[in-house]
Image: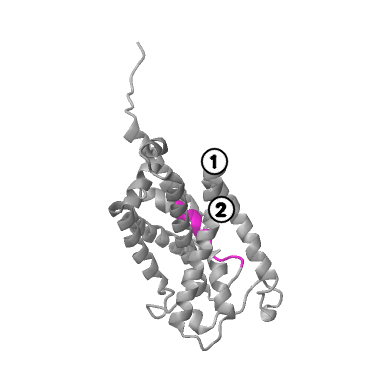
C-alpha cells in the first residue's frame, strides 16, 4: 500500500518538480499508506480480539487486488502491450543510486536511520517501555494503568508506516515503476529476520544483511549449481527452525535415563 500511495505522486507530478520535494512527498505518502492499512488489523484486534497476524496476512490479498485494479485499469501504461505495468517513473521520482553500477540506492539509508530511531524509541522512551510491558504481559500492563488501546494503535501505525516506506523505496529505487510483483516476498523473509534478531533493532540490521546475501546468492546458486531458487527458502527455514528448536533448551532441562 505504501508503494501504491507513493506511486500516485510519481505518476501524476509535473516534470518540473524538484527531486528533493517529490521524493519527500512520495516518502510521506508511502508512510501514510502503510500506516492507514496497518490500523485495520489494529482495530480488529482491539475491538473484536481478532489475531493481528492472521488479519494482516489476509489483508495482503486485499491490498494485492487493489494494486491489480490500478495495474489493469487507470494506471496501466498504454504502451505496455497489455501487461499490467505503469509508466516508468520520471528521473525526479527515482531514488538516486549511491554506488555506480549497482542497485544500492538511497533507500538503504532509510533502513539504517530507522534502526537507530526504533532502538531509541524501544529502549529510551516511556512509549517503548510501555509497549515492552504490553508485549510481555498485557494484563499486568492494564493493571499498571497503561493505555493499551493508544499504545497498540501507535505501534501498529508506526510499523505499517515503516513497511510503507519500504514499499516506496522498492518502486522508486529498484524497479522504477509500479507492477503487481513489487517484491519477491520480502515481507515473509522479514519475519525470519525479526525472529533471528530476537526483536533487537540493531541485530535486525545485521541479520537482514545476512539473509539479503543469501537471497542475492540464490540466483548465483541457480545459475552455477543448477538447483532451484527454492533452496534459498529451505536454507532460511532451516535456520529459523534451528533457532526455535534452541529455545527449548533455554526453557527446559532434558535428562536422559533408564526407567527403574
Secondary structure beneath label 1: loop
Residue 166, image x, y percentages: 47, 65
**Residue situated in front as seen by the camera: 156 or 201:** 156
Q: Residue furthest front?
A: 145
Is residue 186 a member of the stretch shown in magenta?
Answer: yes
- Residue 9 - label: none
Secondary structure beneath label 2: helix
Are there few (<14), some (14-19), or many (20+) residues within 10 Å of tag 1? few
Q: Residue furthest bottom?
A: 16
Tag 2 and tag 1, C-beta contact below 8 Å:
no
Residue segment shown in magenta: 180-191
For image coordinates 44% across by 46% down, the residue present is: 238
Above or below for 101 versus 223 = below
Q: CA distance from mark 2 to mark 1?
A: 12 Å
Are there few (<14), some (14-19), or many (20+) residues within 10 Å of tag 2? some
Q: Quadrant of residue 11?
A: bottom right
Residue 33, image x, y percentages: 53, 64
Residue 89, image x, y percentages: 55, 79
**Residue situated in front as seen by the camera: 190 or 22:** 22
Name the residue tied to disc 1: 49
Left or right of 210 on screen, residue 215: right
Q: Quadrant of residue 210?
A: bottom left
Sequence-wise, the earlier of marks 2 and 1 is 2
- Residue 40 - label: 2
Above or below for 40 versus 117 = above
Residue 65, image x, y percentages: 66, 60
For image coordinates 33% across by 61% down, the residue present is: 117
Left or right of 227 on screen, residue 199: left
**Residue situated in front as seen by the camera: 93 or 154:** 154
Residue 74 can be seen in this image = yes
**Residue situated in front as seen by the camera: 61 or 42:** 42
Amino acid at each position: 500500500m505504501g508503494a501504491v500511495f507513493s506511486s500516485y505522486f510519481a505518476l501524476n507530478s509535473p516534470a518540473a518538480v524538484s527531486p528533493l520535494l517529490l521524493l519527500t512527498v512520495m516518502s510521506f505518502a508511502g508512510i501514510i499508506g502503510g500506516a492507514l492499512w496497518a490500523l485495520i488489523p489494529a482495530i480488529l484486534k482491539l475491538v473484536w480480539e481478532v489475531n493481528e497476524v492472521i488479519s494482516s496476512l489476509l489483508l495482503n490479498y486485499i491490498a494485492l487486488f487493489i494494486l491489480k485494479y490500478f495495474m489493469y485499469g487507470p494506471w496501466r501504461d498504454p504502451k505496455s502491450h497489455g501487461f499490467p505495468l505503469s509508466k516508468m517513473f520520471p528521473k525526479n521520482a527515482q531514488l538516486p543510486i549511491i554506488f555506480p553500477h549497482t542497485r544500492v540506492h538511497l533507500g538503504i539509508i532509510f533502513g539504517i536511520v530507522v534502526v537507530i530511531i526504533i532502538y531509541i524509541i524501544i529502549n529510551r522512551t516511556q512509549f517503548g517501555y510501555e509497549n515492552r510491558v504490553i508485549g510481555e504481559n498485557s494484563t499486568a500492563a492494564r493493571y499498571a494503568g497503561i493505555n493499551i488501546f493508544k499504545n497498540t494503535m501507535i505501534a501498529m501505525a508506526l510499523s505499517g508506516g515503516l513497511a510503507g516506506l519500504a514499499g516506496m523505496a522498492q518502486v522508486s529505487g529498484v524497479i522504477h515503476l509500479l507492477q503487481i510483483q513489487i517484491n519477491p516476498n520480502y515481507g515473509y523473509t522479514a519475519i525470519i529476520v525479526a525472529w533471528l534478531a530476537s526483536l533487537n533493532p540493531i541485530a535486525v540490521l545485521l541479520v537482514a544483511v545476512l539473509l539479503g546475501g543469501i537471497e542475492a546468492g540464490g540466483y548465483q546458486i541457480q545459475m552455477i549449481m543448477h538447483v532451484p531458487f527454492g533452496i534459498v527458502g529451505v536454507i532460511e527455514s532451516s535456520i529459523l527452525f534451528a533457532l526455535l528448536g534452541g529455545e527449548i533448551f533455554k526453557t527446559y532441562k532434558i535428562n536422559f535415563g533408564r526407567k527403574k
